[in-house]
Each structure stands twice: as structure tokens, then as C-alpha cells.
Amino acid sequence: MAHEGGCLCGKIRISIEGEPIGKMLCHCLDCHKISGSAFSTNVVMPVAGFKILSGTPKTFTVRGDSGDEITSYFCGDCGSTLWRNGKVSNFNPIIKAGVIDDPKFINETAKPIVELFPHRRVAWVKEIPGTTEA
């Protein structure tokens, strides 16, 4: 089943299809900044099922907490980060789960099973029971 989503202003639209490769909360410093929050909910999807439906994202590449380069893809108009990719995901897109239109996606499909950089988890966010550190 395909899921569509996009940025806040609607200029960039994406579609993802297939089973998630990974589902995680990330507490890295990049995700703090990108989300404007304490963590980011991410779903790694197979590149074969990923499509840009409309618009052209801007990119920004940094060296992440992993030490490897990671590229963010975002709307140049509203600033929404839609996905990232790099060596850490074998260049499969790391979708920011909140950009998918269907609220069931973030509630069900994107339910995290691992936490990344849990040592950076803020004290008021509880550990996800049963998750493992990746």
C-alpha cells in the first residue's frame, strides 16, 4: 500500500511503498534541531518504493553523530524536512514520519521499535518499553 505525504506548504509531495526497513525514535542532536523537539520519529523505507511526486527539495549535507555524512531533503519554501539519507541507511530514505498524510501511519506503521542515541534522550521522555538501542 502506498502512502503519500508532503511538506507543510504542499509544494513537495512524496510517496512511499513497501514494508519499513526500520522504525525508530532518534535522539541525536541533528534530529533535535530538524524537528525542533526532543526527538524525531523516523521510518527507513526501501528506495525502490520511494517517489517524489511533485516539487524539488533543497538539500543540506552534514556529518552526523554517527561520523558519516547524511543529507537532509527539505522544502525551500516552508522549511519542512521530509527525509534524510546516507550511508547509515544504505541510502534508503529515512522518512520523517510526521510528513505522511494518513494519521494512522505515524500511530501504527511508524511505531518505533528502536531508539537511536538514547544517551541523548531528554529526562522527561520515557524509554520505549521493549525497544533496543541501534
Image (spheres, helix red, strand yellow):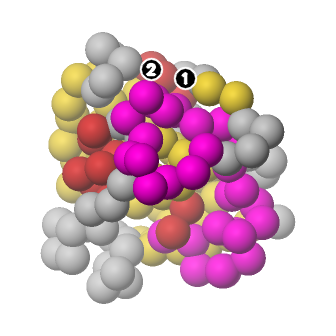
**Residue beneath the point at 58% across and 80% down:** 101
Magenta residues span: 99-127
Q: What SS does tag 2 mark?
A: helix
Most foreground residue, 120 or 58: 120
Question: Amino acid under label 2?
Answer: Lys
Q: Is residue 100 visible?
A: yes
The residue under label 2 is: 87
Most foreground residue, 39 or 17: 39
**Residue beneath the point at 43% across and 41% down:** 121
* Residue 52 x %, y %: 48, 61
* Residue 97 x %, y %: 55, 61
* Residue 72 x %, y %: 30, 45
Question: Amino acid under label 1?
Answer: Asn
**Residue beneath the point at 49% across and 54% down:** 125
Q: Specify whether 92 is left or right of 40.
A: right
Relative height, residue 122 to residue 99 (above, below): above
Task: Give the quadrant of residue 58.
Answer: bottom left
Task: Give the quadrant of residue 106.
Answer: bottom right
